[in-house]
Amino acid sequence: MTPSERTLRQELAACYRLIAHFRMTDLIFTHISVRLPGPEHHFLINPYGLLFDEITASKLVKIDLQGNPVEPTPYPVNPAGFVIHSAIHGAREDAQCVLHTHTRAGCAVAALECGLLPLNQISMEFYGRVGYHAYEGIALDMDEQQRLVADLGEHSVMILRNHGLLTVGSSVAEAFMRMYYLEKACEIQLAALQAGQVIVPPHEVCAHTERQFNAPARPLKAGELSDPDGNALAWQALLRLLERVAPDYRD
């Protein structure tokens, strides 16, 4: 095993444990994957049948874009996970990590005609950056792959209608941080809609806030600050959390 694969295995195992820690799991279902370096587009995904808090770096399954195991493993792979993740890894070079969830809040917003609304600072990270994919049934049809990829487009976030949430990232950390805050945005939206009439900020404010989140290296006006290191600092804090509560993820 190369050092880079070992590192990616540990990062992906950490992501599974964090999804479990923050209660974003669906028993053994849903999936997270990370693409390995090289032209083969091999990627790592969870062993089907294990709860997310049971997953360790060594148990992750390495498969190719056709779903075939690259090396011996006692574990199968979720077929729906293969359909979704192989499609995106094969089409998007920047999508090193793909993360999919079936949370209560995510599924609820996925069932709303309005989709995700810019109702709070957290949701504005995703303003104008969300793709939507119409529900076609359980993702077991290979023909759906082309539509998944087309609906994702160049977005880093997609809401699967009547299904759940999906994020991609150039790293495991980036995909996780997007999912963490996408989930928070969904939770806040549901609470706000239940409470009464909501306030949607003007387009200019939403667009400005989105740039603050996603383009911290942009030219700044006089007196304007940026925070380019926040997500990296948060990821390191999360890894320290795992060292306290679930250090075996690295095994």
Image: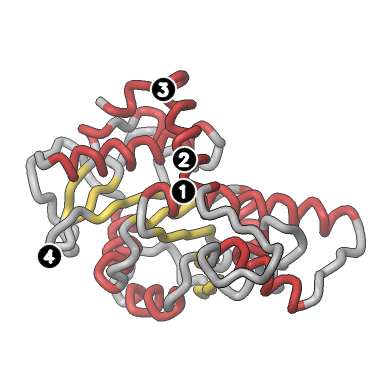
Q: Where is residue 58 in the image (x, y as percent from the top left)?
A: 21, 32
Which residue in the protein does label 4 denote?
Answer: 39
Q: In this view, does 123 lie above or below 247?
A: below
Residue 166's disc is: none
Question: 128 or 152, which lies in front?
Answer: 128
Q: What residue type is labelled 4?
A: Pro
Q: What residue type is labelled 2?
A: Trp
Neighbor class of circle 3 (other Cα within 10 Å; few <14, some 14-19, many 20+) is: some
Disc on the earlier residue, 4 or 2: 4
Q: How far apart are marks 3 and 2 (CA)?
A: 13 Å
Residue 176's disc is: 1
* Direction from residue 109 to residue 75 in the image, left or right: left
Which residue in the protein does label 3 denote?
Answer: 243
Q: Distance between the residues labelled 4 and 2?
A: 28 Å
Task: Residue 72: name its quadrant.
Answer: top left
- Chosen colour scheme: secondary structure
Circles 2 and 1 in contact, beta carbons < 8 Å: yes
Neighbor class of circle 2 (other Cα within 10 Å; few <14, some 14-19, many 20+) is: some
Task: Residue 132: name its quadrant.
Answer: bottom right
Label 2 vs label 1, nearer the camera: 2
Which residue in the protein does label 2 denote?
Answer: 235
The quarter of the rendered structure image containing the C terminus is top left
Q: Is residue 204 above or below residue 171?
A: below
The quarter of the rendered structure image containing the N terminus is top left
Circles 3 and 2 in contact, beta carbons < 8 Å: no
Q: Distance between the residues labelled 3 and 4?
A: 33 Å
